[in-house]
Amino acid sequence: MHMLKKLIAITSVVSAFPASAGMLYVAYDNFTYSGLVTRYATLADAQAGTNAMSSTSIATATNGSAATRTNARDGNLYLASSSAAYDPSDVAYFSTAWYFTQSPGNGNGWGNPNNTNTGFVQYYDETATPTVNGGWSNGNKTFTVHVTGGTGDSFNYARLWAAPSLGGPSGDTSGFFHSFGLSLQANFLTAASYNNTTTWYETAADPDSMTGSASGIFENQSTTNPALNGFYSFSFTFAPGSWASDVGASWGGTAGYTPGSIFAAPGASNVPEPAMLALAAVGLLGLAAARRRARR
């Protein structure tokens, strides 16, 4: 596929917990996003939601016999803020999970219906520009993330599907976000475990339930197709599960990384729990996230 590797910095909107504000690590890629992309001629119209030129919803994507979940795309969320024990960078992104495949020998993204420009999103920032808050609550069974950002995009990886255009070269979508916001709340039946090495509470389980959303305004500045340029307001809703999980897809060739998660932050309680997660899981997902940071 003629696409850049697409990564996107995230924004999450929920309560901030003082004990863990700005101190968390999340790697999660077993959820979908769906919603609307609305095009405007001016930033003022996009901000006011007036004089829309077009409004297009995320559609089911196909690739041969493979198809995404109905009117939804697989998502990937990764951030590391003030979490030196897990990752040295203040990275934050939310992106389409294009890289999973049922045929690892053919390379990442092979046969993945998410591996298309249509419906693609990416906000990526390795600087301290995004504001990140969140952490554990509810006896370390609820994890929330809050990130707010805007122009950022220190590596010029900003992307948002230039609706209503379908497919097309990746250069058709190029520009920056005037605003970006995303909310995520993950709920677990079993409390996170205390890690004696990092002194944080963490879990490698997928959430038993989750809710989330993302919204903002993207200014398209394509040089390959200027006719698509303008201001695009987007509103996405998250749901658990993914095409990759449904079909048992993986990425990384023989390494076989499947959809997984790590949620880690200082705990809501100062009393350590006896269980301790293996750091290997954190390391693997950290390496996986690092590899996904390069452009496709």
Image (tube, helix red, strand yellow):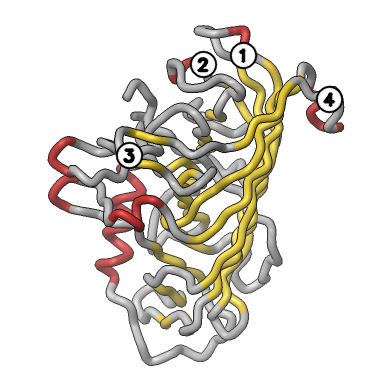
| Mark 1 closeness class: few <14, some 14–19, many ≥20 residues within 10 Å | some
| Quadrant assignment for the C terminus | top left
Residue tagged by mark 2?
Answer: 172
Q: Residues within 10 Å of mark 3 (few under 14, many from 20)?
A: many
- Identify the residue shown where x is 33% and y is 64%: 282
Residue 191 locus on image (x, y percent): 48, 84
The CA span between labels 4 and 1 is: 16 Å
Query: In this figure, which residue is indicated by the disc labeled 4?
Result: 45
Find the residue positioned furthest to the front: 65
Q: Which badge, 3 or 4, is on the more N-terminal residue?
A: 4
Tag shown at residue 112: 3
Residue pictured at 52% horizontal, 55% vertical? 81
Quarter of image, res 100? top left
Identity of the amino acid at label 3? Asn
- Which sits earlier in the primary sequence, circle 2 or circle 4? 4
Q: Nearer the viewer, mark 3 or mark 2?
A: 3
Q: Are marks 4 and 1 in contact (CB under 8 Å)?
A: no
The Cα atoms of the two marked residues, 3 and 4, are separated by 36 Å
The answer to whether the residue labelled 3 contacts the one labelled 2, judged by CB atoms less than 8 Å apart, is no
Q: Which residue is mark 1?
A: 228
In primary-sequence order, the first of circles 4 and 1 is 4
The answer to whether residue 153 is visible is yes
Marks 3 and 2, how far apart at CA: 21 Å
Q: What secondary structure is marked by label 4?
A: helix
Q: Earlier in the sequence, mark 1 or mark 3?
A: 3
The amino acid pointed to by label 4 is: Asp
Q: Which is more N-terminal, label 2 or label 3?
A: 3
**Nearer the viewer's eye, disc 3 or disc 4?**
3
**Within 10 angstroms of label 2, few (less than 14), some, or many (20 or more) residues?**
many
Name the one closer to the observer, 202 or 59.
Answer: 59
- Asked which secondary structure carries label 2, the reply is helix
